[in-house]
Image (cartoon, helix red, strand yellow):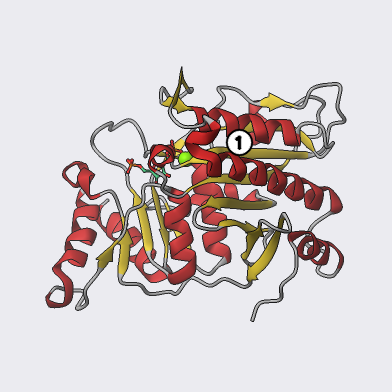
Amino acid sequence: MTRRISLTQYLIEQQREHGHIPQELRLLIEVVARACKRIAISVNKGALGDILGTAGSENVQGEVQKKLDIIANEVLIEANEWGGHLAAMASEEMDDIYAVPNRYPQGEYLLLFDPLDGSSNIDVNVSIGTIFSVLRKVNNARGVSADDFLQPGKQQAAAGYCLYGPQTMLVLTVGDGVAMFTLDREQGSFVLTEENVRVPEDTQEFAINMSNQRHWDAPMHRYIGECLDGADGPRGKNFNMRWIASMVTDVHRILMRGGIFMYPWDKRDPGKPGKLRLLYEANPMSFLIEQAGGASTNGRQRIMALTPTQLHERVAVVLGSKNEVERVTAYHLEHD
Ligand code: AHM
Ligand code: MG
């Protein structure tokens, strides 16, 4: 059975015994966790907290913002701006970066987040989440700009998500495997419930929005076609399908029992590399999946090796059980 220790104790062990994280990073993760607890309270209130529905505004990507998108974004900023660990934050819901105001001390870290992932599920009471990623500001010059955030995902110091589901769970990596914490509401603290999470290398379960099938490229038709052919087809086995439309929830299932998640490039908007955001969604999820022994590519290259050129850059995503991700990637490379 997993040791029942708190997130604080886990992080202190990472700092003290394993030397994995400096104190500043530990405190930063604790603040993110505290913000997620506040978001969880709002999520749980639902209609009683007047948090459902749209806010009447659009984000930089032209998507209609939900009230909860905005609330979660504000909670994360307010919780993190004064602690002294951060130089700036960037969010899926903000056009530009948010530099820590001058009245607070400046730290060396950069925090990136998708404050409320799975927005289409908010109003229908289906699991949603918060995704976060931590980078170090490598440029020592004074001040901070969007360019400081344009680092490949392999440079992440930490990443994780908080899942607001039947249980509220925080899932974290600081580059030493993946740990999962469940919120104990009576104690008000996250308690370690899963350590050394491993994604099985093989799977018979895929996650993709099948309604986009007609827009896919040939390698995706081939891969999914073979899965659908089942035991009589070239794969010789049957596949099951799941699609929650909350990446946090689909990735959580894959961390727990394996599977492959795909949001590929498609012909609806040929100039757009994919739907999901590299910095706020693909990189942190790739870090978690790789730390659990899985793989993550954009169909051709390792996602965490990509150097972003803009803050809100999008990317195609294929992640999860290693052998399936390698197969999808090989199909793309063979086709090129
Ligand atoms: P969001 O950050 O605006 O919620 O969008 C991201 C979500 C992912 O969580 C999910 O995998 C995907 O969008 C679902 O897209 P679709 O509705 O096209 O199936
Ligand atoms: Mg999202």
Count of number-bearing discs: 1
Q: Farthest top residue?
A: 56
Classify 10 Å Cα crowding around label 1: few (below 14), some (14-19), many (20 and above): some
* For residue 296, above or below residue 137: below
Place of residue 318 in the rendered image (x, y in percent of width and height, measured from the top left): 39, 54
Place of residue 186 in the rendered image (x, y in percent of width and height, measured from the top left): 70, 58
Place of residue 124 in the rendered image (x, y in percent of width and height, measured from the top left): 38, 42
Q: Farthest left residue?
A: 232
- Amino acid type of the residue tagged 1 in the rendering: Leu
- Of residue 229 and residue 241, the one placed in the foreground of this image is 241
* For residue 72, above or below residue 212: above
Q: Farthest bottom residue?
A: 1
Asked whether mark 1 and ligand 2 are closer than 8 Å, the reply comes as: no
Place of residue 10 in the rendered image (x, y in percent of width and height, measured from the top left): 76, 65
Is residue 322 at least partly visible in the picture? yes
Residue highlighted by disc 1: 150
- Residue located 46% across and 32% down the image: 52
- Residue located 78% across and 50% down the image: 25
For residue 145, side relative to residue 258 (left or right): right
- Of residue 119 and residue 336, the one placed in the foreground of this image is 119
- Residue located 67% across and 52% down the image: 158
Instruction: Tell me the quadrant of the picture where the N terminus can be found.
Output: bottom right
Q: Quadrant of residue 237?
A: bottom left
For residue 72, side relative to residue 318 (left or right): right
